[in-house]
Image: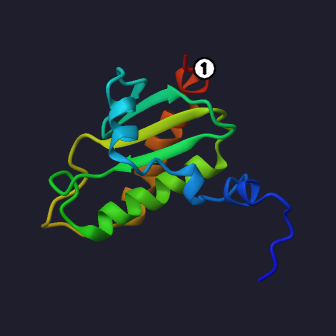
Amino acid sequence: MINHLADPVQADAGGADFARARRIIKTDEFSSVFRLRPVQKTPHFVLYARANELSHARLGVVAAKRFAPRAVTRNTIKRVTREIFRCSALQNVDCIVRLSRPVNSKDGPATTAQLKRELRAELLRLFAAPACKKVG
C-alpha cells in the first residue's frame, strides 16, 4: 500500500484512526496521568486527564479482570472506548479511562446489546465533560 502523506508522523497521528502515536503505552506515562485527580466519574468508569505537549490527544484504557472477568467483556469495553475517543474532538490531552466497578459477572452473558448501550452512554458522558476538554 502506498502512503500518500509526505510526513510519516502525520500518517501515524492521523485524525480518526487509533495509531500507535495516539496510545498511552508506557508505564511511566500511565503513572504520570494517574497521579492527578480524576476529571470525571460515572457509575463504572473514571477518567483521568492531563495536558500534553503533542499536537493530538492520546488514550489509555485500563479494564481489570476483577471488574470484567471475561476477556470478551474487557475487549468490548476497550473497543467502545477507542471508538468514542476517535470520534471525540480532543486536543493535546492524555486521557486514561479506568473501569472502576464490575460490569457483569461470570454467571451472566459476556456481552449483550444492552450492556454495550450502557457502556457507550457512560463513555460518551466521560468524553463530553468540559473538564476533559480544558485540562490544565
Left or right: 83 in relation to 1? left
Residue most extreme to the bottom: 1
Q: Residue 32: where, in percent of width, then height?
A: 37, 30
Q: Residue 79: where, in percent of width, then height?
A: 47, 61
Q: Residue 69: where, in percent of width, then height?
A: 18, 62
Left or right: 12 in relation to 21? right
Give 135 or 107, whichever is nearer the viewer: 135
- Who's the residue at 66% across and 59% down the image? 17
The answer to whether residue 111 is above or below residue 87 is below
Quadrant position of residue 5: bottom right
The residue under label 1 is which amino acid type?
A: Lys
Left or right: 33 in relation to 59? left
Disc 1 secondary structure class: loop
Q: Which residue is mark 1?
A: 134
- Who's the residue at 39% across and 63% down the image? 76
Give 42 or 54, whichever is nearer the viewer: 54
Left or right: 82 in relation to 73? right
- Who's the residue at 31% across and 70% down the image? 72
